[in-house]
Amino acid sequence: MSSLETLLEKTSRTFALSIPVLPEPTRREVMIAYLLFRIADTFEDAAHWEPARRIGALREFAALLDAFSPDEARKLARNWSAAGPSPHAGYRELIDQVPAVLEAFFSLDPAAVASVRAHVVRSCDGMARYVARTRGGALVLSDVADLQAYCYVVAGIVGEMLTELFLLGRPELTEVAPFLRERAATFGEALQLVNILKDASADASEGRSYLPPGVPRSEVFGLARRDLEAAARYIGALQSAGAPRGLVEFTALPVLLAQASLDRIEKHGPGSKISRPEVFLLTQKLKRSLDRNRPAVPIRP
C-alpha cells in the first residue's frame, strides 16, 4: 500500500514540495486534507463520466466523511476504481487508497477532523452543483462572478480550511486571525485563476470552459494579479505575527510559483509552464529571504 507521502508526490508536484516544510501536527493535517480535496477533484474532473455518476460519487464521498465505515469505503473505492475515474495514474491510485486515506484522516485531532470535514463536504456540495450544470459534457461559466463563485467552491474553501488549521493551537496568531480569514478565500482564488489560465486550452479540449465567453482575458489576468497581491499581504501578516517559518514557507512558495507562471502565461499563452530549474531557483530565493528575515513575497508595485 502506498504511503500518504507517496500519494502526495504522485498527485501534486507543488504540494509535495511545500507540505513537508510545515511543522507538526499541521504537516500531517494538511497532507491528508489535500488528499481528501484531490479525491473530490478527481470526481469533479471525470468528464468522461455522465454527470449523474460524478454527482453520485461526490455525494457518496461526502457521506463517508460524515459517517465513516471502513467496509463502505472499501466497497465504494472498488466501484469508483472499476469505473475508471481518471486517465492520471496517480489519481487512480489515490481512489484505490480512499479507505486508507480516510482511516488516517479520522486518526487526526478531533478539532482538525471537524474543520477539514466541514470544508471538504462544502466543496463536494458546490462541485456537484457545477457538475449538474454541464450540458453535452461541457461546463461553461457565464461571467466573472460565476468564475469567482466556481473558484470559491474548488479553491477558496481550501484557503479557508488551511487558515483554520494554521490557527489551531497557535495563540500568537490570534491578533491577525481576522485579517487572515478575510483574505483566505481570495488566496485560494488567486492560485485557481492562475491554473485556469494555464490550463485553458487543455480544459477546452475536455469540455470545460472556465474562462467565460465574452470576458476579455486581460480582465481575468488583472483579477489574478489583485488576488495574488492579497495573498502576499496574507503571508506578510503571518510573518509579522511570528508564525512558524514552515507556515510562511508553505504559503509563500505557491504564490511565488503562481506569480512566475502568470508572467509566463501572459507572455507565451496557455500551456506555458515554469521549468524545474526555475522552481528550484524560486525555492532557494525564498529560503534566503526567510534566512535574512525579509518579506517572503514582496508586494509588487
Image: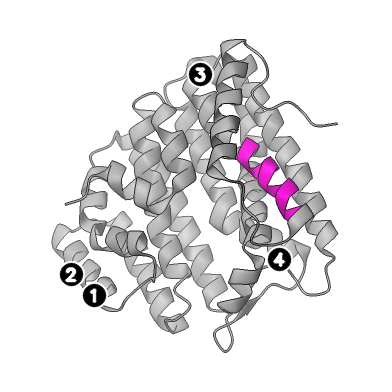
Residue found at x 23% / y 57%: 97
Magenta residue span: 256-266
Kindly identify which residue carries mark 2.
75
The amino acid sitting under disc 1 is Asn
| Snapshot quadrant of residue 291 | top right
Mark 3: amino acid: Arg
Q: Are marks 1 and 2 in contact (CB under 8 Å)?
A: yes
Using the image as rendered, state which of residue 289 and residue 113 is in the foreground: 289
Judged from this view, the residue extending furthest toward the left is 71
- Measured in 3D between alpha carbons, the distance from the residue under mark 1 to the one under mark 4, in whole angstroms, is 33 Å
Q: Mark 1 points at which residue?
A: 79
Label pair 1/4, CB-CB below 8 angstroms:
no
- Helix, strand or loop at label 4? It is helix
Say if 48 sits above or below 122 in the image.
below
Which residue type carries mark 2? Lys
Q: Whole-Å distance between the Cαs marked 4 and 2?
A: 36 Å
Q: In which quarter of the image is residue 295?
A: top right
Element assignment for label 2: helix
Marks 1 and 2 sit apart, C-alpha to C-alpha, by 6 Å
Question: Which residue, given by chain and number where applicable, does mark 4 sit on?
Answer: 146
